[in-house]
Each structure stands twice: as structure tokens, then as C-alpha cells.
Image: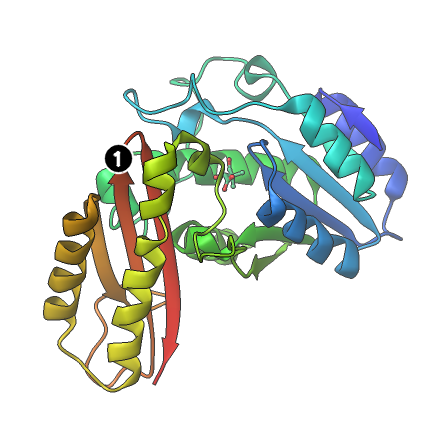
Amino acid sequence: MDVVETIHDLRQRRRIQGINQVVGVVPTMGDLHAGHLRLVDYCREQCSFTIATLFVNPLQFGPKEDFANYPRALAHDRAELEQRNVNLLFTPSIEEMYPEGQSAHTTVAVPELSDQLCGAARPGHFNGVTTVVSKLFQITQPDYAYFGEKDWQQLTIIKRMVRQLNMPVEVIGVPTCREADGLAMSSRNRYLSRDEREIAPALFQTLREVATHLHEGSTAYADLEASASNQLREVGFRPDYVAIRDPVTLRLPSAKHESVRVFGAARLGRARLIDNIGVER
Ligand code: PAF
């Protein structure tokens, strides 16, 4: 596996591949777990040349968020990616990505989708994501790009950005990897104490109960959301939201909607956990 730190070196390696390779990219912020490695596996299956990127993007963290403490594990990540036969790893510095500084940087923003759900709790977060992801697409010029469904809102926003800006890349969503007790894998699970780790799977369980009610035909969306939030509060979470939405527009679904998605975000100790489940009716 080749490891490069500059855009110049990345471009050079990418150019050598020419048009004969099917190039896939897996953008990550590192501290890789089985969920990331599943993205790599999907990429390796579909593409002949796999690029992974590892960059903890300061632009998508709020001033009071965990940018400074976000887990960093470069040597471990490198070894995992090497073992997975990734062809090229890009690990740029902040200066390489934002040479004129972060506040002077051009922003890519996807309106409507970016301001709600996690965007309401984390103002500016998704603009940071779409800005860095569009830069990574420009730099790596992939045919395919892989993102986890755990971050469903992010995935939806990136798909819309790609479509509206006519970017020549196909965005692939990859199913969420879960621990044996159902907790969605996330680098932020590291922040949980042992007691909190025992409580954490209740987020997925609660969303699953909502999904069951929806599957059985309930359309009392507001009631289901409110009682799920209460349930989370009772076991010790501080919920940001439980929300039933259209999976593509993220708008409130009508009673006739056949396909809906249940989203949840809740704080537990130092961690903010998110999860979501699709429901077909
Ligand atoms: O999902 C993530 O890890 C990040 O938001 C991403 C897509 C790598 C952009 O920094």
C-alpha cells in the first residue's frame, strides 16, 4: 500500500492508473473499526483500485465538539488497510487541505437537508462534511465512493450534492455494522464508560420498537417519537431527537408513505450516539 500526504503525490499516483482502472474511494476520519473495513470490502469487490482517505476534518466539528480528542490511531489504521489490500492511502495535514485557513475556504452547502436532525443539533456540521467530501472527490477522482448507512443523513446529503453538482461519481451506501448487542459501531463508542456501554444498545432497541409499530401500520408519528424519546430519557440518555422521516427528502412522511426511516440521536455521558432503521410498509 502506497501512503501519500500531499495532493500533488495523490494526483500523480491517480494519474498513473489512467482510465483502465475502476477507482473507488473510502473517505474516513480514521480510528478504523469493522464498519470502516466493511466499506473497504465493498470497494475492493467493485473496484480495481481502492483509495482510502484518513483526515480528521476540523471543518465539520463545532467549537464545543470533540475535534481535539477525536481518537487518532494512524499506525493501527495503516496496518488494517494494508491487510485489506488497499492500494493507496491519503493522509493529508490540515494545512494541505486548508492552506488559506478554514474560515477563508470555499464552502459547499446542501440546503434543506443539512439544517435538520443532526444539522439542527450541530450547526455547520454538514457544510463541513460536504466541503471536505467534494474536495476529496476532486482530489481522488473516483468512479465510486463508499459511506456507511449509520450516517444516513450524511449519505443522503452527499448523494444530493453529487447529483446537483453533476459530480461523476456513484455514491454507495453500506449497511451499518453492529456489535453483538445491536449497538452501531462508531469511533465515539470509545467515549462510553462500562456502565454507559451497557445502556448504549437501548438506542437501537428503542428505534426497533418504533419500527415495529410503523411496520404494523401505525401512523401516529409524533406520539411514537415522543414516547421513544421518553424511553431513552428513562434509561439515562439525553436525546436530541427521535424522528420518523422520508428516507430521501428527510421530510415528515404522510400516512400513506410506504418507505420511512426512523432516526435517533442521543447523548450518553461524553458520547453522542446516532442510529437509524428503514421500515417498509
Ligand atoms: O463519516 C465520516 O467519517 C466523515 O464525516 C467523512 C465522510 C469521512 C468526512 O470527513
Residue 25 position (above or below residue 277): above
At x 31% / y 47%, what residue is drawn? 199
**What is the crowding at mark 1: few (fewer than 14 residues within 10 Å), some, or many (at least 20)?**
some
Between 232 and 97, the residue placed more toward the observer is: 232
In which image quadrant can residue 78 be found? Answer: top right
Residue 248 position (above or below residue 148): below
At x 46% / y 24%, what residue is drawn? 70
What residue is pinned by disc 1? Answer: 123
Between 15 and 148, the residue placed more toward the observer is: 148
At x 17% / y 80%, what residue is drawn? 219
> Residue 180 location, x and y as percent?
51, 56
Report the side of 241 relative to 270 (left or right): left
SS of the residue under disc 1: loop
Whether residue 112 is visible to the viewer of this picture, yes or no, is: no
In which image quadrant can residue 202 be found? Answer: bottom left
Q: Disc 1 residue type?
A: Pro
Mark 1 CB lies closer than 8 A to ligand 1: no
Between 123 and 180, the residue placed more toward the observer is: 180
Report the side of 234 relative to 216 (left or right): left
Whether residue 93 is visible to the viewer of this picture, yes or no, is: yes
Image quadrant in which the N terminus is located: top right
